Image: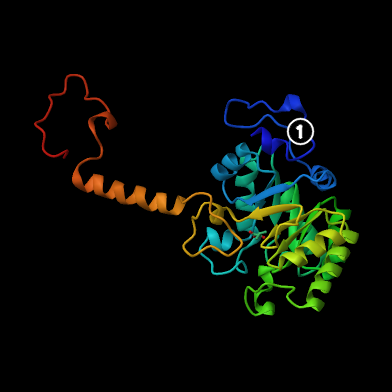
Amino acid sequence: MTDRLESLGSVPPDARASTGDGGSAAKPVTVPDLRAARANGRKIVALTAYDHPTARLLDDAGIDVLLVGDSVGNNVLGYDSTLPVTMEEMLHHTRAVSRGARRALVVADMPYLSYQTGRRDAIRNAGRFLKEGGAAAVKLEGGRKRAGLIRSLLDAEIPVMAHIGLTPQSVHMMGGYRVQGKRVDEARSLVEDARALEEAGAFAIVLEGMPEAVGRMVTEAVGIPTIGIGAGRFCDGQVLVFHDLVALGPGPLPKFARAYAQVGAAIASAARRFIEDVRGGAFPLDAEVYGHPVGLPTPARSGGR
Ligand code: KIV
């Protein structure tokens, strides 16, 4: 825990004690803390989270940023892309995560068509994540074409994390989920995007799905933190999708992800054992039933029925 808390600069030594109730007494991570982390060369560690118990566990483990990604669509809601995800769905999940986060910075992903339709929509929707969702910042996809929008959100006091490279909301424009920046002109374009986003006031940029060399070029070209997912080792931090981290999804992991636990397999095994025990009469046992009422005659045993 202490190692993680030390990953960002703002945690005073006397704020490291656990509260003893599963939460952390540490000072909450702020947007300026993330900027300071880059300046001080400390890696930022982020994970997606979509629900309260997961947010609690990840927060207690010392994660810096909980991203309520619109990947909730693929990972939790059963959609085959992020495009169908709605504002109401995102708010519902953001509220659950915010209630579980005591230290981590909660960033809410703006779903498709919640910001592409104009600045008024974008401010109203982004503001809802802070006002109703308990988030501290929002994330939106796109490069230099989002610069004006980001300025408008900052005018409304809404911190913005940008996201370039493989941007899943552009799946149809990209012709699939493809690594971006593989040609030199594309790589330079990503650098220009990142510079424009920094200039507009984004406090960090997610770099997704690009060659390591491009992740490095972008990181070296800007002064704000880059947080990579499939963008190599030279970013200022790393983010993974929670369901990849614990192998909870159905399919094979993407090349850049690492499973630190096999939770999907553990759940399936628990369910199989439960089915077997119930059908075989091994669940529940005596210790798992409430005591017999006083004065009621004990019936002869008949297989639990
Ligand atoms: O929605 C999401 O999970 C994301 C991450 C891939 C950064 O945007």
The image's colouring method is rainbow
Instruction: State the residue at coordinates (80%, 46%).
Output: 41
Q: Locate residue 204 relative to residue 279 in the image: left or right.
A: right
- Report x, y in % for residue 67: 67, 52
The C terminus is located in which quarter? top left
> Farthest right residue?
199
Instruction: State the residue at coordinates (69%, 73%).
Output: 170
Q: Nearer the viewer, residue 255 or 285?
A: 255
Mark 1: amino acid: Val
Packing grade of label 1 (10 A; few <14, some 14-19, many >=20) is some
Q: Nearer the viewer, residue 152 or 271?
A: 271
- Report x, y in % for residue 236: 76, 52
**Which image quarter: residue 243?**
bottom right
User: SS for tag 1?
Assistant: loop
Q: Is residue 278 above or below residue 28?
A: below
**Which image quarter: residue 105?**
top right
Ligand 1, seen in the image, is in the quarter at bottom right
Q: Locate residue 186 relative to residue 178 in the image: left or right.
A: right
The residue singled out by tag 1 in the image is 11
- Report x, y in % for residue 81: 58, 69
Instruction: State the residue at coordinates (80%, 77%).
Output: 184
Q: Locate residue 170 relative to residue 296 in the image: left or right.
A: right
- Report x, y in % for residue 156: 85, 53
> Farthest left residue?
300
